[in-house]
Amino acid sequence: MAKTFEVRLSGSGGQGLILAGIILAKAAVLENRKVTQTQSYGPESRGGYSHADVIISDKEIYFPEATNINCLLALTQEACDKFLFDLCENGILIIDTTFVKNLAMVAENTYEIPFTEIAQEKLGSPISTNIMALAFLVKITGIVKESSLKKAIEETVKPAFVDLNLKAMQIGFELAKK
Amino acid sequence: MTEKEISKQTKHKTPSDKASLAAKPESKLEEIQAKHERKTILMQGNEAVAYGALDAGVNFFAGYPITPSTEIAEILAAELPKRNGVFVQMEDELASICTIIGASLAGAKALTATSGPGFSLMQEGIGFAKITETPCVVVDVQRVGPSTGMPTSPAQGDMMQSKWGSHGDSPAIVLYPDSVKESYELTIRAVNLSEKYRTCVILLLDEVIAHMREAVCLPDIANVKIINRIKPTVPPQWYKHYDENQKYLSPLASFGEGYRFHVTGLTHDSHGFPTNKPGEAAEMMERLRKKISYNIRDLVQIESYQMEDAKIAIFAAGISSRAAKAAIASARAEGIKVGLLRPLTIWPFPDDAVRKMLRNVDTVIVPELNQGQLIHEVERLTKGKSDGGLIPINKVSSELITPNEILNKIKEVC
């Protein structure tokens, strides 16, 4: 693994991408890594475009935005189109095929999973799609330990939603095994 | 503002008594220590400002929440009441600045937080705090302007406003952090300097730093240096509200302590009463100027990064300096001798450090998220030197200046 790993979680407002970014960053802190987490979003609380960047490194991180993305998660077509070409060589692309139908470029390491559909089907709501996709990303990249992710989820989400999110996490891990 | 008005303002918020407004650092320390375990945690820039304020002894906040500064108000609304402090959500920013000035005159350590549109509205009050020499801190988390601009996007457009925003000739103290940790440190410093110099100190933040999260371990509260305003040692009948010492700093009594004084935005004499006498007017203005200019070494902080052998220097503050550091790492890997001079205090401007930089390098690159503001201050100091060596990088599109853009400029000039 490269010394510095840049993740961009992208999609639209309301999909929980910034929360997912915070959880990933917390997991990295639990492992004593250096980390920055930034975000970009419009004034809307739902809809509009949104992304969260997490940079994890063993050395000091100067610039906190992802400029050479090692792993891109795209939950919408718009986000995928916008950032696909910022993926670094051999970068990992994870798309939610519920909303991403076309790929402008074939990335070498592409994972196509209908996260939102699966969340709706198995958990009865698309609300934990973010955690499912994040768990998938963590399992594929190995950027943080699964146990750190679990702990970060437990520390971050409201108590009433911990179980639901841990279920979503487990589904994410299992999807990545296949 | 009369004593009566101030007590009216604070009374319904602190039913106990006015004395509870006065900063009591000793009792607060234990409380915070108990509440706030000092381990490495993921923290946001705005959170760091809020906890910095609490650690510095701020016990009064009045504000009108605005993106991208909202979390500061949100956290202080939850935390201040637990520590016998006061949080007031005001009707607007004009009232916010006036209320923190009133609270400060009653002995509180007072702070407000806003963004560009609110900062513009606060300018008159900031001038009032300066002429009445009342300690207070205004945090301005900058966003894209002018006017309402882009609430969630970064810009560095308020650098000049933070100095010249209020009418009349008044020196300013403005601090500018580049990380979450430094946001905490400079908030404490802002509160300390406001107390020491009896003035309104401004903390400028970039949106991206205010919203960024980083791993931070805050220092043990026992190691946080707190400065409290100098209190008068004379009996009330001898008290002069503006009685400067050798360093142009004056003791400050609080309303309710038995000291009677007059506070006005009009030019005043040493007792605080309005005056039209040129001599007294000049004396007051000189004090406002000299308390900054005679203490410049105490006020100015800079970071000099890889400047020892640099032939090219980058002069940048806040988030732009972080892009610069990334660019420097790449350029140094290719053998290009480039360094960074970063002001942590942008006002008063670090003239001496910039002059030294100009002596030692051939080229200075100034990246700013505006159309060119601090570059003119650098230019002012190049007087007598052949120019052509001063290169701006500006961006006002809501995006950050990237390390690559700075690197490309470095390569163009070397």
Image (cartoon, rainbow, N blue to C red):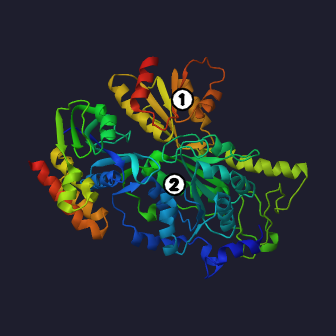
Which chain is disc 2 placed on? B
Disc ID at residue B69:
2
Q: Is residue A159 left or right of residue B45?
A: left
Q: Nearer the viewer, residue B204 or B196?
A: B204
Residue at (29% x, 64% y) in the render: A155
- Label annotation for residue B23: none
Q: Considering only vertical position in the picture, is A112 above or below A169?
A: above
- Left or right: where A30 falls relative to B228: left
**Which of A129/B371 is in front?**
A129
Task: Answer yes or no: is residue B387 visible.
Answer: yes
> Type of residue at label 1?
Met
Q: Where is mark 1, residue-wise?
A: B357
Q: Position of residue B35 (x, y in %)?
A: 40, 71
Q: Is residue A53 visible?
A: no
- Count neighbours of disc 2 (C-alpha within 10 A) and say few if under 14, some if 14 to 19, many if 20 or more: many
Please provide percent x and percent y for residue B380: 65, 28
